[in-house]
Image (tube, coloured by chain):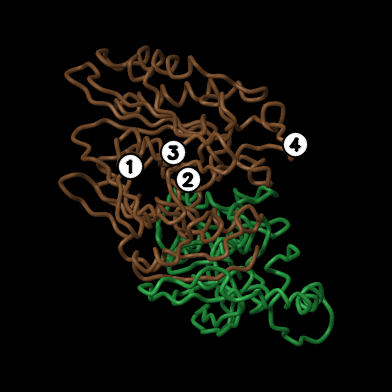
Chain colours: A green, B brown
Amino acid sequence: MSKIDSEDHGKKHPGKKGFSRRSFLQGIGISGGAVASLPKGLLAEPQAESGARVMGPGPVPVSLRINGKVHNLNIEPRVTLLDALRNHLDLTGAKKVCDRSVCGTCTVIVAGHPVYACGLLAIEAQGKDIQTIEGLLSTHGKAHPVPTAFVENDAQQCGFCTPGFVMAVKAFLDKHPNPTMEQVKQGLGGNLCRCGTYIGVRQAALDAAREMRGGKRA
Amino acid sequence: MQAFEYAKPATLKEAFGLLGAQWGEADLLAGGTDLLSLMKDYIHKPKRVVSLTGVKELKGIKSSSDGLHIGAMVTLEELLGNAQVRKEYLSLVQAARGVTSPQIRAMGTVGGDLCQRPRCWYFRNGFGLLAREGDGKELVPNGENRYHAILGNSGPAKFVSASSLGPALIALGAKLTIASGSGNRNVDADKFFLTPNDPASREVDLKPNEILTEIVVPPAAGTKNATYEVRQKEALDWPLATASVALKTSGSTVSSAKVVLGHVAPTPWNSAEAAQALVGKPLNESTAKAAAEAALAGATPLSQNRYKIQLAKVAVKRALLAAAGKA
């Protein structure tokens, strides 16, 4: 079997019009679909006393509750939450950079905790509340205080780490509503910015905290 | 990542029925931060992944007369949130905080920290745990070895143990419970980590059909303990060297000592020499320094990692002074 990354196969085609890098990648995914038809029963059947159901390796139903809305997918167990968001649900705010639970660009909030979506299987995120950056966008003309504070503090340069940082800040402030600068530094230790926008990001976190507490901005 | 079967048992009994007899058949999934990376790089290609996230027996921290029972699936964040851990086991708190990413602490588990595979970049790039080319040539001695072992590296294994909690648990005298379908066995944390001599061996004392279920840390009972970690960056970095210490004192002198270094050898490195240098003496800057010298006296650095000797000495000295409340 050739090495086919989980990004490149087994996804549904959204049938979008026009052409983009995304739709191109999604298009070539169709030809990788053959990987899904691996032989069943790779391992011996679970022993009789084991009541746990063995699923896959082909697509299985996976239900994800994202930003309050339930999405039903049919995906292989190996699909990460990040790939499910980006490739199957077109929620492309969380970015894929290291894909090894190191850089933080894919940070989303699962059950109240900041997590690397690349390091969590989508199937493992079932039954938990998943918040993504898309949930913080303006729906009634008013964006969440965290992204607003990022804009006001010019807390990004190339912007690629920004969605991950915004979610890391939100997760941190949800638990630490009145942090010190030192706590902010420690609390954002799981995200990298290669442009070096940390100063702006930390100030944005402090400003957003004040805003979320209902205080006035400095 | 290679496709795999997935199962999420609700009990240990169910889990045992899903495991294979050989490595490579089934892998256990805890927090996933290491396993998923290993699978994406085709270092692990399990036919089945058995998720432990639904097994309630592996969760929670319970206090009992024989010590603190920490479930293997307790996350690092849960460990840090436990009042008794914070009060009595400073060295565990400092070791877990050394994992500087809140995301990793929220996902990663205590059992996963102990069972994660080494970070050696030759291993992670498919050259095996002993880092050899196809013709058997060793890659580490004349290769990129700045992060490799400076102690315990005379055999074929040159990687360093990746565990952050291992040194602290060994210093505190913890025992691990390892379960399989045929019963439980207890292993001293000190004996859990192994230095493999052949490519098929693992670096921890676990069989493919076994599950690490619980870590029992004996009552602190006044044991002074601390961990000090040296790393290049403030945040989001692997340690270059760590030291965890546990001391008992009688009056102003040290009556017993454990000094365990991390990230300097294929296993956490329990230094009898450092302990011996402390017993019967008062703990101060000069005895802490002498213990650090003793711990590293037998170091055998590779071509690029001599600098780790000094960092490890600093870690030992500062951990000792922190445990004594003098740092």
The answer to whether marks 4 and 2 mark residues whose Cβ atoms lie closer than 8 Å is no
- Residue type at mark 1 is Val
Residue beneath disc 2:
B99
Q: Is disc 2 placed on a helix, strand or loop?
A: loop
Q: Label 3 vs label 1: CA separation?
A: 10 Å
Q: Is disc 1 placed on a helix, strand or loop?
A: strand
* B251 in relation to A207, above or below: above
Is residue A149 in view?
A: no
The answer to whether marks 2 and 1 mark residues whose Cβ atoms lie closer than 8 Å is no
Chain of the residue on which disc 3 is drawn = B
Q: Quadrant of residue A140?
A: bottom right
Chain of the residue on which disc 4 is drawn = B
Residue B135 got which mark?
4
Which numbered disc, 4 or 3, marks the residue that appears first in the sequence? 4
Q: Is disc 3 placed on a helix, strand or loop?
A: loop
Residue B75, x across and y down, in percent = 39, 55
Residue beneath disc 1:
B187
- Residue type at mark 2 is Val
Which numbered disc, 3 or 1, marks the residue that appears first in the sequence? 1
| Residue density around tag 3, few if under 14, some if 14–19, many if 20 or more, within 10 Å | many
Q: In the drawing, does residue B40 fall left or right of residue A113?
A: right
Location of the N terminus of chain A by quadrant is bottom right
The answer to whether marks 4 and 3 mark residues whose Cβ atoms lie closer than 8 Å is no
* A99 in relation to B285, above or below: below
Residue B193 got which mark?
3
